[in-house]
Amino acid sequence: MTGALRGWAVTAAMLGAVVVAAGLAREVALAASASLVWPLPHWWSKLTEGPAYVSWLAGAAAVLVAVLCVLAIVQLTGGTAGEAGTVAVGDGDQQARVRTAALQHVVAMILARRVPELGAVRTSVRVAGRRVAVLATVEAEPRGLAALHRRAVAVVAEELRRVADLELAGLDLEVVRFTVSDKEAT
């Protein structure tokens, strides 16, 4: 899904949510007070009492909004509707499916083994096609973070290529706590 289409889907979903919320507020207000009079807007009567093609166009627009919302949800979950949370590995008929949770585990494991300066590694993985974006939540010493990040990027990129022939789109390190080694404490 392209960025523009994703933007339209999010916009349509937000507008739909606003319309539904307004309708719900109206119904709650009418149900709360028997003396309240809140007539429907003029455009609503045009939809229901006007020419049939207007109603058909409104229905088609509603269906389009629903489809865009479903596409946005599928895009955000990182897969197709039946395969959310997995990534296809391989080409053509020779494909395997790998769960994103498995990729998260591999990335966390490889960072813990090959970059031991990072402590308590937790990862989050987002897959878009053949590209993987990683967020690693770590504990680290308060120096040399740039060099540590470069090492982590190299290690994770190599492992993703080796394990699943995937490309690393980016690796963000989120340091939640700085640690001090035993040597520095004395």
Image (tube, rainbow, N blue to C red):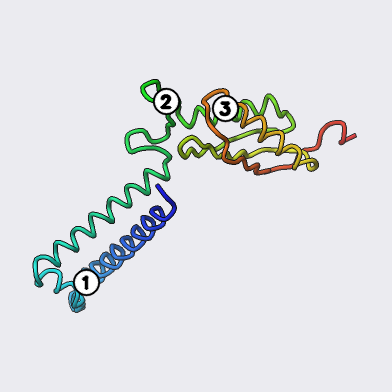
Image coordinates for residue 10, horizontal then vertical, percent? 39, 56
Dot placed on the residue nearer the N-terminal end, 2 or 3:
2
In this rendering, position of residue 146 left or right of residue 9:
right
* Disc on res. 91: 2
Image quarter (top left, top right, bottom left or bottom right) of the C terminus: top right
**Residue highlighted by disc 1:** 30
Q: CA distance from mark 2 to mark 3?
A: 15 Å
Q: Would you place residue 145 above or below residue 113 in this image? A: below
- Mark 2 belongs to which amino acid? Asp
Q: CA distance from mark 1 to mark 2?
A: 58 Å
Q: Residue at x 62, y 31 (%)?
A: 156
Judged by depth in the image, the label closer to the viewer, 1 or 3, is 3
Q: CA distance from mark 1 to mark 3?
A: 60 Å
Dot placed on the residue nearer the N-terminal end, 1 or 3:
1
Image coordinates for residue 95, horizontal then vertical, percent? 40, 23
- Mark 1 belongs to which amino acid? Leu
Circle 2 SS class: strand
**Residue highlighted by disc 3:** 161
Q: Crowding at label 1, few (<14), some or many (≥20) Cα neighbours within 10 Å?
A: some
Q: Quadrant of residue 158?
A: top right
Residues at discs 1 and 3 in contact (Cβ within 8 Å): no
In this rendering, position of residue 156 left or right of residue 15:
right
Q: Residue at x 14, y 74 (%)?
A: 45
- Mark 3 belongs to which amino acid? Arg
